[in-house]
Image: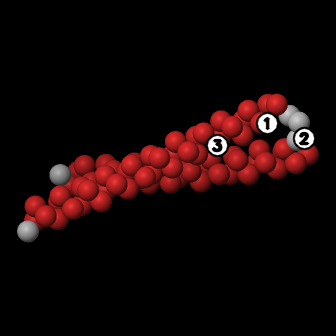
C-alpha cells in the first residue's frame, strides 16, 4: 500500500517539474510574440503549450487526490 503512495508522490513531483518547464516555454513564446504578434507558428506553439499545461495541471490534481486517498487508507489500516 505504501508503495502506491510513493508512486503517486513521484508522479506528483514529476508533474510539478514538467509544469515549471512548460511555464518557462510559455513565457518564452509570449516574449517572442511581443516582437512578432502575427506569427502563426508562435500562436500554434502557444496553444500547444497551454494545452500541455492544462493536462499537467489535471495530472497534478489527480495525483494529489490519489495521494490523499492512499494516505487515508494507509493511515486507517494502521489503526
Q: CA distance from mark 1 to mark 3?
A: 12 Å
Give residue 15's position: percent from left, percent from top: 48, 49
Give residue 27's position: percent from left, percent from top: 73, 51
Task: Say which residue appears at 50% left-offset and 54% top-offset.
Answer: 16
- The answer to whether residue 16 is left or right of residue 79 is right
Cβ–Cβ below 8 Å for labels 3 and 2?
no
Label 3: which residue?
50
Task: Say which residue appears at 72% left-offset and 35% top-offset.
Answer: 45
Cβ–Cβ below 8 Å for labels 1 and 2?
yes
Answer few, some or many: residues within 10 Å of disc 1's Cα (few below 14, many 20 plus, some between 14 and 19).
some
- The answer to whether residue 66 is left or right of residue 61 is left
Quick one: label 3 or label 2, which is nearer the N terminus? 2
- The answer to whether residue 16 is left or right of residue 36 is left
Residue 10 in sight: no
Task: Tally the marks.
Answer: 3
Q: Is residue 30 above or below residue 69?
A: above
Task: Say which residue appears at 45% left-offset and 51% top-offset.
Answer: 60
Quick one: label 1 or label 2, which is nearer the N terminus? 2
Element type at marker 3? helix
Q: In the depicted view, which residue is nearer to us: 49 or 17?
A: 49
Q: CA distance from mark 1 to mark 2?
A: 8 Å
Element type at marker 1? helix
- The answer to whether residue 29 is left or right of residue 22 is right
Q: Is residue 32 above or below residue 6?
A: above
Q: Is residue 48 above or below residue 21?
A: above
Label 1: which residue?
42
Cβ–Cβ below 8 Å for labels 1 and 3?
no
Q: CA distance from mark 3 to mark 2?
A: 19 Å
Q: What's the mark number on residue 36?
A: 2
Amino acid at each position: 500500500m505504501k508503495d502506491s503512495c510513493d508512486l503517486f508522490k513521484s508522479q506528483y513531483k514529476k508533474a510539478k517539474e514538467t509544469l515549471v518547464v512548460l511555464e518557462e516555454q510559455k513565457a518564452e513564446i509570449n516574449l517572442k510574440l511581443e516582437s512578432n504578434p502575427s506569427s502563426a507558428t508562435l500562436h500554434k506553439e502557444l496553444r500547444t503549450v497551454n494545452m500541455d499545461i492544462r493536462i499537467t495541471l489535471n495530472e497534478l490534481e489527480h495525483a494529489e487526490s490519489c495521494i490523499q486517498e492512499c494516505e487515508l487508507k494507509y493511515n486507517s489500516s494502521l489503526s
